Amino acid sequence: MADIAPHRADIAGHGVHSARPVLNGYPKGRCFYGYREISILYGSDTPADVDHLFPHKLKRCDDGKPIDGVANLVLACTDCNRGAQGKFDQIPALPLLERLHTRNEYLIRSHHPLQTGASREKRQNYLQDAYNCATVFTGSWQKWQPRAEGVAVF
């Protein structure tokens, strides 16, 4: 079995590395944002970053939201996550929140359940509340949207 590449956040102590295999199952080796092919294997030419859809700094917004939880983590190509036009700590555009909800619903129906609400409506409200909190907390009404580089797979 190939080694899974470390992520820079793991080195900083965020501990999100263990979510990579679970996260990789949904986008089928594609960047969550721009759909570019990515890999979680060590030494890959197309490495996958683990990204917080809601930036890590928002832990101060609502400490009840698990910013480091699988429900908020996605795999991204390095360009979308931290490239010249990358997301960094920007708030994502609303369609990305909707895509995250779709992804989370997929994971709930799979063998990797998420604990963000007992019903589909509660899970959607959970994400929407986090989105609203993030927008108010940062004062940023402008949202980040990636440029698609491949075919949508989810």
Image (tube, rainbow, N blue to C red):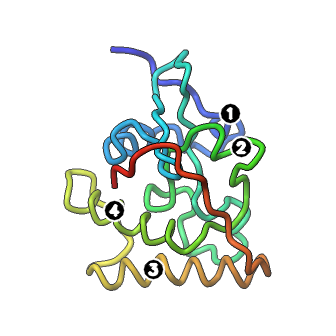
Report, in whole angstroms, how far the alpha carbon at label 4 lies from the one at label 1.
Answer: 25 Å
N-terminal of the pair, mark 1 or mark 3, is: 1
List the residue tagged with mark 2. Answer: 82
- Quarter of the rendering containing residue 10: top right
Q: Is residue 140 left or right of residue 87?
A: right
Tell me whether the residue at label 4 lies in contact with that at label 1, contact meaning CB atoms closer than 8 angstroms: no
Report, in whole angstroms, how far the alpha carbon at label 1 lies from the one at label 2.
Answer: 16 Å
Residue type, label 3: Tyr
For the point 45% across and 79% down, which residue is it?
126
Q: Quadrant of the N terminus?
A: top left
For the point 45% across and 34% down, which residue is it?
37
- Secondary element at tag 3: helix
Q: Is residue 66 above or below residue 118?
A: above
- Quarter of the rendering containing residue 20: top left
For the point 72% across and 72% down, which residue is it?
60
Label at residue 114: 4
Residue type, label 2: Arg
N-terminal of the pair, mark 3 or mark 2, is: 2
Label at residue 11: 1
Q: Is residue 8 above or below residue 60?
A: above
Residue type, label 4: Leu
Q: Position of residue 81 (x, y in %)?
A: 65, 46
- Secondary element at tag 4: loop
Q: Residues within 10 Å of mark 4 (few under 14, many from 20)?
A: some
Q: Nearer the viewer, residue 139 or 57?
A: 139
Q: Nearer the viewer, residue 51 or 114?
A: 51
Tell me whether the residue at label 3 lies in contact with that at label 4, contact meaning CB atoms closer than 8 angstroms: no
